[in-house]
Image: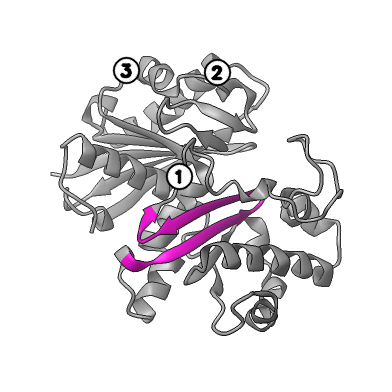
Amino acid sequence: MLDHYVGVDIGGTKTEVCLLALSNPNEFASAQLLTKKRMDTERTTSLSNFLDRLNSLTESILSTHHLTMNEIRGMGVGVPGSIDPKWGVMRAGSIPFFLNTPLEGAFRDHFHFKGALAFDNDANCFALAEAYFGAGKSWADRNQIKIKDLCMIGITLGTGVGGGIIVRGELLRGRRGGAGEVGHTTLVESGRPCYCGKRGCVEQYLSGKGFASMPLEEYQGHLISFLSNLSNCFDPHVIVLGGGVSHQAGIYDRILERLSHACFLTEDPPDVVPNERGDSSGVMGAGLLSFQAAIHEGVCNGVE
């Protein structure tokens, strides 16, 4: 008998839904990705319209496998914004209809779902997936580091720039869920204006749009400055890059040498590696999120 989980990765442009099956109900590492489908997010629509479309997409996936929402153990949702861990609302982010909305109630009403339900930042979901099943895990295995001792930062370089911080195998969320919002730290003083109201944000330089607007050498210079600041703050073992820009081989040229010179601790800088889960990172991380929520609700026993 398989346990099933649904992962939802909501981005500013596309939303992806996946169905995961666990052959061992106590080990998320046994999860198999059965199906995943996408739809347009349509950021200017209403919350009700978005959830109606998301519900239809999810039901189409489940029906293919002869399942209903009542048979799903958990549902995890990654959103492009900061989720307040106390109130479960998105305090800031790029999708207007999610802002300051009690997400759990809205999702349960639309999906008629009573199982484990969890929400988090999409970059946090990316970081979780890469730490447990992707490049972070591969790095830890090669270096004989246990997940409970791993310090890893996941950075998404795509439409925007997001970050997820793993400390000793656990997500660092912060007081209001805002930990890891590295895309809106200042990279260039009095630089390009950002939609958040500030100027010179990392996102304006290191996103896909930023990559397309400057020579590779200039882009990598900004990337090194950014990563060295992260290294000085968190001293991670490894930094995993995701998003479309992470596929550009040139950004990794001599990166450890240059990062070593830029960091305060010049010896043994963190490794910088591309992700391994690719487009599946977000939905896999969201699925893991729901599995962890099920643990807290007593549905299953743990993550291996």
- Say which of 4 and 219 sits in front: 219
Residue 266 in view here: yes
Badge 1 amino acid: Arg
Residue at 64% over, 27% down: 42
Could you tell me which quadrant the C terminus lies in?
bottom left
Predominant SS of the magenta segment: strand
Range of the magenta residues?
149-170
In the figure, is residue 143 to the left or right of 13? left
Residue 78 percent across, percent down from the top left: 47, 39
- Residue labelled with disc 3: 112
Q: Secondary structure at mark 2?
A: helix
Residue 177 percent across, percent down from the top left: 49, 38
User: Residue 47: which disc?
Assistant: 2
User: Residue 156: which disc?
Assistant: none
Residue at 58% over, 39% down: 11
User: Residue 173: which disc?
Assistant: 1
For discs 1 and 3, the disc positioned in front in the rendered view: 1
Q: Is residue 137 magenta?
A: no
- Say which of 86 and 132 sits in front: 86
How far separated are the C-alphas under marks 1 and 3?
A: 28 Å
Quarter of the image where one finds residue 142 = bottom left
In the figure, is residue 272 to the left or right of 54? right
Q: Secondary structure at mark 3?
A: loop
Above or below, 141 against 203 in this view is below
Residue 6 percent across, percent down from the top left: 35, 38
